[in-house]
Image: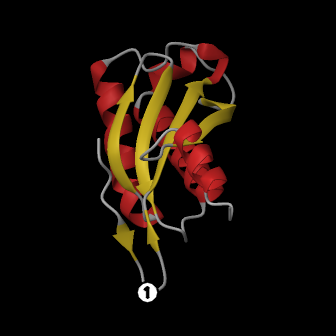
Amino acid sequence: MRHKLDRSAHSVFALYYHLVTVVKYRRKALYSFDIRERLKDIVWDLSTELDIEIVAHEPAEDHYHLLFKATPKTNLVNAVNVIKGVSSRRLRQEFPETKKLLWGDSFWAPSYFLATSGQVSLGVLKEYVESQAEK
């Protein structure tokens, strides 16, 4: 997939991120189609507020994958915390039956995985940077 370059007043960028967050205790709390679709709707609604663009996202029964595009000004830690916090609160309120699988105020495990996703592999990029040395 070829990424479109974005522009601001002083920069050109293509910032893509892959987020994976896991349900606490790896419980299968996203067991129904309705819960998974509601999670996607919640995150979609938050994307404007967080100034991110969702490229793709799909929940499984015990975790959630989100591929999104950001800007250099995006506060990634805040974005992840808002996504996890708001979705946790709303899913527990709207689907109280999930409380049978989880206890306390947590829906998501405290940790998460976040990786950049570029247009080229890390190896190709490393070779390019190293080739820029003056000869």
Q: Nearer the viewer, residue 56 or 123?
A: 123
Percent coordinates x, y for residue 90 in the rendering: 46, 42
Q: Is residue 85 left or right of residue 2?
A: right
Counting other residues with Cα less than 10 Å from the Cα at mark 1, is it few (<14), some (14-19), or many (20 or more)? Answer: few
Q: Quadrant of the N terminus?
A: top left
Residue for point 49% across, 18% down:
29
Quadrant in the picture for residue 72: bottom right
Is residue 88 shown to the viewer in this render?
no
The residue labelled by disc 1 is: 9
Amino acid at dot 1: Ala
Report the front residue among 75 and 118: 118
Q: Where 7 sits versus 9, above or below?
A: above
Dividing the picture into quadrants, the one containing residue 134 is bottom right
Query: In this rendering, is residue 19 above or below 52?
Result: above
Q: Is residue 91 left or right of residue 25?
A: left
Query: Residue at 50% of width from left, 38% of height from top?
Result: 121
Q: Position of residue 57 (x, y in %)?
A: 36, 36
| Picture layout, residue 57 above or below residue 17 | above
Q: Is residue 39 visible?
A: yes
